[in-house]
Amino acid sequence: MSVNQPYKDANALPDVVPVFPLTRALLLPRGELPLNIFEPRYLAMVDDAIASQRVIGMIQPLPGQDEREQTPILHRIGCAGRITRFSETGDGRYLISLTGIARFRIEEELPATLAYRTCRVSYDDFLIDLEPGAGEADVDRTGMIRMLREFADGSQLDVDWTSIDAAPNEALVNALAMMSPFGANEKQALLEAVDLRSRAEILVALAELDLAQNSDDPPQFH
């Protein structure tokens, strides 16, 4: 099943969203994040989301916590995504894709009445996310492509350069940020970048630093 309904007005977005805490999982506006859902609480979350506006908030836990913690402390900024693909496996898992809509700031976490966590959120700081292509003209595309070629050459990656050349700046920057191999703190920095140009600059700086530190074994984009 594939469903897509772009949001053009923050007032149309739910101000209470279920949140899915997942370290190093980065969702950005109009990016697509595949997820394999198997925990009962998150299966219930997907069921409820599909029955309403199909919106789920992706967010990272703060670093340094026990991964087994059921209710880790969360970062304040995440990204809302809409379920745009859904399938169920024979063993009861859900395979879904979230398409990013807009970033949000958590205003409060609501009392636990469901198996999963829900938060009241505000999109006011990130209204630019609702404008497709905003800031594309300010991105140093040449620098982005040069960085990607260095990664590809250093790690012997087979890159579809035709698709890369055809990708708009927003899609290129956000896809590279989402696929990047960086840690949780770096992912959060990419998420919180004030605009597309800043995100591209952070991404290039992180990639150059990693290449310099690991010149014998450069990181790969997955």
Image: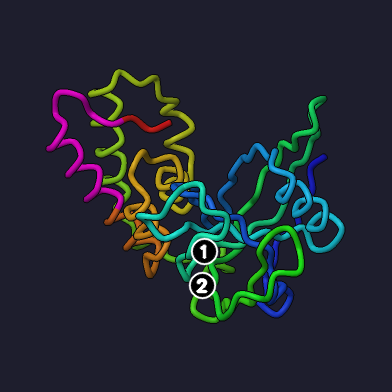
Answer with left or right where residue 37 lies relative to residue 184: right
Query: Image quarter for residue 32?
Result: top right
From what the image shows, is residue 144 above or below residue 8?
above
Q: Residue at x 30, y 50 (%)?
A: 203
Sequence-first tag of 1 and 2: 1
Residue 138 horizontal/vertical position (percent) = 34, 62
Count numbered badges in the picture.
2
The residue at the point 68 percent across, 77 percent down is: 15
Please rate how many residues cluster around mark 1, counting C-alpha atoms within 10 Å: few if below 14, some from 14 to 19, many from 20. Answer: many
Query: What is the three-letter code of the residue carrying label 1?
Result: Gly
Residue 218 colored magenta?
A: yes
Question: What span is in magenta?
Answer: 203-219
Q: In this view, does 51 lie above or below 128?
A: above
- Residue toward you, 168 or 198: 198
- Between the residue at mark 1 and the residue at mark 2, the CA separation in whole angstroms equals 15 Å
Marks 1 and 2: which is nearer the front? 1
Q: Which mark is residue 78?
A: 1
Q: Residue 154 carries which label?
A: none
